Every structure is written in C-alpha cells, then in structure tokens.
Amino acid sequence: MLGKLLLGIVFSLGAPLGLFAQERHYVSYGGTAGFQATVWAMKDLGTFEKYGLNGDVVLVGGSARQIQGVLGGSTDFAQVDITAVVAANLKGADLVMVGGTLNRIPFSMVTQPEIREPNQLRGKKIGVVNFGGANEYAVLAALNEWGIPSSSATIMPAGGAATRLTAMSAKVLDATVLSPPETIKAEKLGLRILLHLSELKTAFPMNVMIVRRPYLEKNRDVVKRMMKAHSDAVYQLKHDKKKGIAVLQKRLLQRETDVIQGTYDYYTPKFEFPPRVNREGAAATAKFVMDRVTTGKASIDISKLLDESIVDELEKEGFFKTLAR
C-alpha cells in the first residue's frame, strides 16, 4: 500500500479536482517502444476521464517488475506480453488477461548488411534482451518458420534495444530483433531489415492487459470502464493520424518526423479493435514458456488465463459499433 500511496503523490499533480475523491487507478507499461502507444493514448487522449476513471499510466521497466507491481497492489493493471503472464501463473500468481491490443510479433530481424537471407544466420550471434521472454520467442519462431534449427545459431542475452543497436553498430552482434523507432535508426546506420516478424504466420499476444483475478471479481465495473477507455484510445489511434502522431511525439521524445511517421505507420494497422487476444497464439506461447520454465512437466489452462467476458459484454452492448459511428 505504501507503494500505491507514493505513486498517488507523484502522479496526482495536475489531475482535475473533481477526480480527487475517486480511487486512483494505475496502468503500467514496460518500455518506450511504439507498441506501448495503446496505453499512452488513454492518458494523452483523455479516455480515462471520458469513462469516469481517475487513471494514469506509469513506466515500470521490465515485465517482471510490472508483474510484481500488480501482485503487490502498487498498480491495478499492466500491459505486458503473454510470456510474463504465463511464467508468473506457473509460479502461483492469479493473473488474468482481460483483453489485448497487439497479436503480432512487433519486432524485425535486423542483421549486418552482408546477411541477405535467413540461411546466412547459421553460425551467427543473435542478441536478445534475455532468455524466456518475447525477444527469444520471436527469434525462435522466425528460425522455426525458416527451417533453421535454433542450435545452429548462438542466441545470447545482450541487453535492451538501445544497447543491442549499439552492439550491432560495433559489429559485436550479427543480428538482433528490434522494433520502431529503433529499426528506423538501424536502417540509417546501414543495417539490414531482413524481415518484419509481424509477417510470420505465428500469432503472438504482445500487448495484453492484465489484472489479478480477485480484483476482476471485486471491481468488475472498474475493469469494464478501463477496457472502454483502452478500446476508445485504440480506435482513436487507428483512425485519427494527427492524434496518434501527437501521442508518439510526446512519449518517444523524437524530433525526427520520419521516425515518428514510420513508427505510426508500422504499428497502428496492427492494433486490435476490438481488443481481443488471439487464443491460438496464446496457447502456442504458453507451451513455449512451459517448456522453458518447467521443461514440459506442467500445463496451464488458457481458458483460466484469459477472461474476455468484459469484451464480450461490450460487443453485445454495441459499444464498439458506437465508437465506430
């Protein structure tokens, strides 16, 4: 509770006076990649207030810390990738996904310029953030689809996107996976975009909104209003380019218009509206995580991990059609 109180002090500055009587609700996000725009837009486009929420967004670096924040009560909601949710629940957490806004791998395989085709990745060093997360999953999914055994390349932890981009520039790594705006910077450095992994057949729930199951059961109206705010933000991002560009400019702190434009054009067509999680992708990812965490000795029920009953309600009530009108 102390963590939540401190967050309230820091983030309540500037909030409309009429909202102070309400409990404050925080949504965490894990980094500054463009796919976080669906969370940023809730704050920047005013959809929290539109649906009667005293809400804010807060950067909590890394999905593990985001999970800890939700479990500890410092934040009520978090936008994370599904690998973090499965791993936490396998260890006894009670997290549930209530919706999702991105079901594609948001990364691109970036290589040294001399690597012109996937087969040339054999024997090469491929950098990822760490083992067991979305980066490693993306690399393994790509190698599998290309028919390249994962053992034929060296996949290694190499730090965050900025660190890996520097390593690529210094030729310490042969390849890595990056997302806009880093991919745009990579091209400017003369590196090659071998493939946008969003084009793979593999579905991957990258942006999922999570809460604790007891919180969902006790605060269903709050969660429903949160999903309204989230859905509205996604719709505006997809259909109002001027607003979307403004959100990215503010949050990415980028002055280069081509970087902002490229980031917007890459992500917004991929955002899900209505915000549903791809079940096939969820099941495939869950198996990947279980194989890593428990060496295949445990199982997890996707129907218990995913509760889209609120999204179902909103669809039945015509909410998404109302936004479109």
Image (tube, rainbow, N blue to C red):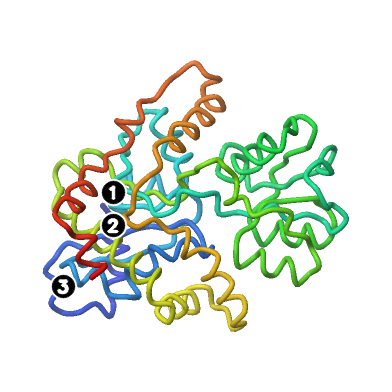
Q: Secondary structure at mark 1?
A: loop
Rounded to the nearest angstrom, the CA distance separating label 2 from label 1 is 7 Å
**Is there a contact, CB below 8 Å, between mark 2 and mark 1?**
yes
Residue type at mark 3: give it: Leu
Q: Position of residue 142 (x, y in %)?
A: 66, 41
The answer to which image quadrant residue 214 occupies is top left
- Look at the numbered disc 2 and give the secondary structure of its residue: helix
Q: Are marks 3 and 2 in contact (CB under 8 Å)?
A: no
Residue extending farthest to the top is: 297
Residue 73: which disc?
A: 1
Label 2 crowd (10 A; few <14 / some 14-19 / many >=20): some
Q: Earlier in the sequence, mark 3 or mark 2?
A: 2
Q: Residue at x 25, y 56 (%)?
A: 227
Q: Contact (CB < 8 A) between labels 1 and 3?
A: no
Nearer to the camera, 273 or 231: 273
How many numbered marks are there? 3
Asked whether, in this view, residue 121 is left or right of residue 94, the answer is right
Q: Which circle, 3 or 2, is nearer the viewer? A: 3
Residue position marked by numbered label 3 in the rendering = 19
Question: Residue pushed farthest right?
Answer: 114
Query: Between residues 98 and 62, which one lies in front from this camera angle?
Result: 98
Question: Where is the C terminus found, in terms of image quarters?
Answer: bottom left
Residue 38 % position (x, y): 39, 63
Q: Is residue 134 left or right of residue 93?
A: right
Mark 1 Cα shell of 10 Å, populated few (<14), some (14-19), many (≥20): some
Numbered tag placed on residue 4 in the rendering? 2
Q: Residue at x 39, y 53 (%)?
A: 79
The amino acid beneath tag 1 is Gly
Pick whichever, 123 or 267, lies toward us: 267
